[in-house]
Every structure is written in structure tokens, then in C-alpha cells.
Image (spheres, grey):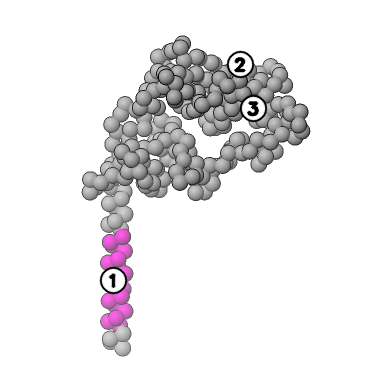
Amino acid sequence: MIGKQSRISKHFLGMILMLLMLACMQITVLGGTWKFDGPRIWEWWYVNDDGSYPRDTWSKIDGKWYHFDFEGYLDIGYQEFDGKNYLLDERPGSTLGQMRENEIHRTYRVGSDGEVHNYEIMFRHPEADNESYYFKETGASLVDVAKGLGLCGSNPARGYEGLFELANLEYRAGFDKRAEDIELMNQIFSNPPTHYEILTFNVKEGEDFYDYLNFAKIYVSDCGRNMDYYYTNVTGGYIGQNRLKVIVYWPNWK
């Protein structure tokens, strides 16, 4: 009996020591520090107490998932890893770089694992006008979603691209450069593009940044039929609290 009690005591002490070790390990993880090299908003990196830092990997910090590039800087925005798409918050502030999860929006949803699923665009009959296009997953027409976002002009039935004849959308060609456009691109790009166009959205209160960005991609894809928008990339960034600038750029322009 005494031997059994002794074994139980040793087992109990072993469990206590293990818990203490785990607690110490957790303290070490939480004891890291964020560092900012700047000036670009994504030039944040995280240094652990032992001097190491995550590179080209996911890392869970204070209960939130982040992804760091091969140099150790934060990845932000719409990213693809291992064949899956993710949204890493690019709004300046305390949520910068955090993986978004468990969200449902007008044009996409985000799963519990962070994977982004953009809704598929369908049409109801062959001679499709704007009213005929809809999102398969929700059944909502593009026109209704555009109206909800404040993106319909005076005549939304004018044509598919007519969705973007908008009162609250401002267009700036790349040759008409403005200081705020240049500042934004210097924040986003290591090597800013030389040929680009800017779309500016006034994001409605309570609406989502990426719903507007997705509509801009729809617009670019549709207008691409005239060849002007082939071989373009689309990205976006905030200017102020509720203003979104979408940059359509030609990465291989010489």
C-alpha cells in the first residue's frame, strides 16, 4: 500500500512539473515583441524571447493567426498558401495581418480554418442582362448586391459594366498621379507599378472592404473583353476610415 501511494505521489508530482513546464513555455510564446521597420505598413515582424522570429510560416500570437513572408515580415491582404486563399487583415491598426475566419459576406465567405470561398457568378437565361446575373451560393442578384453596397448608377440595366457607372466611384488614370495615390502604392508595393488605374470607393458603414474589391475584380474581368484589362492584377488599400482605393495595374508593362 505504501509503495502504491509512493507511485501515485510520484505520478502526481510528475504531472505538476509537466504543467509548470507548459506554463513556462506559454509565457515564452506570449513574451515576444512586435517590431516595425517601416515605412510600409506590412514591415512588421515578431521576435521571440530567444531572438528567433517566424519566417515563411504561420504563427499563432495572442490567440490570432498571422503569416510571415520569407524575410519575416507580415503578409497582408488576399494571399494564397498551399493552393488555398486567405484574407490577412490589411486595415491599419491592431488587427493588421490577422487571419480572418468564420465570416459571411455579400460576395464571399471565410471558413473556420481561414480559407476564403468567393461566390460563383451564374446567369438565369442565355440573353443575360444585369438582372440575370446572380451569386450561386446566396441567390442574390449582382444588381441587388451592388445596390446594397451603393454601387448602382442611374441606369443599372444599361449593360453588365453599367454596374460601375457610379456616383461614389472616382476614377484616376495612372498618368494623372496624385500624392495620396503614390503614397498608397509606396505603402503596398516594394516596386510600385508604372502603369495603373485607380478606383476609389466610399465604403458604406457596416459593409466589408473585400465585397467592394471583389466587385472591382468583376468589373475588370468583364471589361477585359476589350483587351485593355487583360494581364492586369487588382489590389486595394485604405485611405482614411471609409475610403477604399482599388489599384488595377499591369505588372509586366514596359
Residue depicted at x 27% and y 76%: 10
What's the magenta region?
5-22
Looking at the image, residue 100 sits to the left or right of residue 119; the answer is left
Residue depicted at x 43% and y 13%: 178
Q: Is residue 196 magenta?
A: no
Q: Which residue is mark 1?
A: 14
Between residue 22 and residue 235, name the one nearer to us: 235
Q: Which residue is mark 3?
A: 146
Q: CA distance from mark 2 to mark 3?
A: 13 Å
Query: Dot 2: what SS?
Result: loop
Q: CA distance from mark 2 to mark 1?
A: 69 Å
Between residue 139 and residue 218, name the one nearer to us: 218
Looking at the image, residue 178 sits to the left or right of residue 139; the answer is left
Please provide percent x and percent y for residue 84. Answer: 49, 44
Q: Is residue 20 magenta?
A: yes
Residue depicted at x 61% and y 39%: 119
